[in-house]
Image: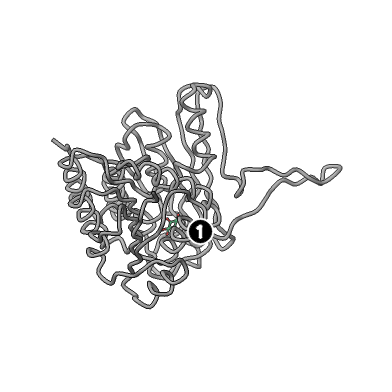
Amino acid sequence: SDLRVAVLGVGMMGGFHVETLSRRVHGATVSVINDYDQAKAVAVAGSIGARTESDPLAAINADDVDAVVIASPGTAHEQQVLACLDRGIPVLCEKPLTVDPVSALEVVKAERRTGKQLVQLGFMRRFDPEYAAAKQLIDSGELGRVLLLHCVHRNMANGPHFDSAMMITDSVVHEVDVARFLLGEEIASVQVLKPTATSAAPEGVSDPMIVIFRTGSGVIVTVEIFVRAQIGYEVRTEVVGERGSTLFGLDQHGITKLSGPDGSGRWGGLVPPGFIERFAPAYQIELQHWVDAARTGGIDGPGAWDGYAAAAVCAAGVEAVRTGEVVPVTLGSIE
Ligand code: ISE
């Protein structure tokens, strides 16, 4: 029988997950919708024949719920994930796992005590076909030892509340997970460079920034984060190895178009407007993997430790924005 899913938070992300789970993922039914805006919860629930629950903890503990998707504001995640662990049910939690590394490590430990892996983090890029192919290429050894990653992450626009710290915790966090995923090792330090800001940035916000990670083995990752780039949503990555490189994310579908005669040739493609359009296939694959695993009581993707490591690197990144220094990342122990 179908996995009965409660979705907590039906903003842009949660609303899209409801639609994907209901229309494009097999083996799942969204049974309960919760949102702090009850009218919104009612509207979304009505569109798919689910019921609403005004208290998120009641939704997690409801009899008609086997698993939970958390897409509520980040400040609510810790309590909601812990409630899922208390009940022993699988949860797909959008980033962040919690708002700081200390509480994130507590969640890792709480999951440990259940003796199961129940927490999956919504780092959807791991499921994007291009990232997955790049991971395979790296692991095949064809590129030789990887020396560098170059990541570009641009958004069309963001409001004045989106400050330099949020650019790290909300946006660069994806590159933190991508780097850890592709390289298979932890990030050891973070540094941030601040070029002249775009005139679109509010006073005091450093947009764009160059964020530099160094891993334990010495691989360098450069990240351009530019969240008011005006054009659209551009996320691309280049992997540089000893014997070759690979560049991906050039457009939404990974296709490079060549056209134009006699030297007037151009190459290019679509620039999607936002992350929903860019990563729709990744979200669908992510949810299908999660549903398939949750039906047998587990997860299949980045876990609580990945959420903790991301929180630790982002905390160092926020410190690096403030100080301009190279800030070391020290990971705690779960013992
Ligand atoms: C947003 O929360 C995301 O996760 C997007 O992928 C990212 O591009 C954006 O900057 C974030 O605000």
Could you tell me how many numbered marks the image carries? 1
- Residue located farthest toward the front when viewing the structure as drawn: 1
Give the residue pinned by disc 1.
155
Q: For the residue with label 1, is its CB less than 8 Å from the closest atom of ligand 1?
A: yes
Residue 115 shown left or right of residue 177 in the figure: left
Residue 22 spot, x, y in % from top left:
47, 58
* Identity of the residue drawn at 33% across and 59% down: 6
Residue 110 spot, x, y in % from top left:
17, 46
- Residue located farthest toward the right when viewing the structure as drawn: 262
Q: Quadrant of residue 55?
A: bottom left
* Neighbour tally class for label 1: few under 14, some 14-19, many 20 plus, Cα within 10 Å: many
Residue 138 spot, x, y in % from top left:
48, 28
Q: Nearer the viewer, residue 194 or 83?
A: 83
Q: Nearer the viewer, residue 96 or 47?
A: 47
Kind of residue sitting beneath label 1: Asn
Q: How is the image coloured?
A: one colour
Residue 58 spot, x, y in % from top left:
23, 65
* Identity of the residue drawn at 42% across and 41% down: 178
* Quadrant where the image shows the C terminus: top left
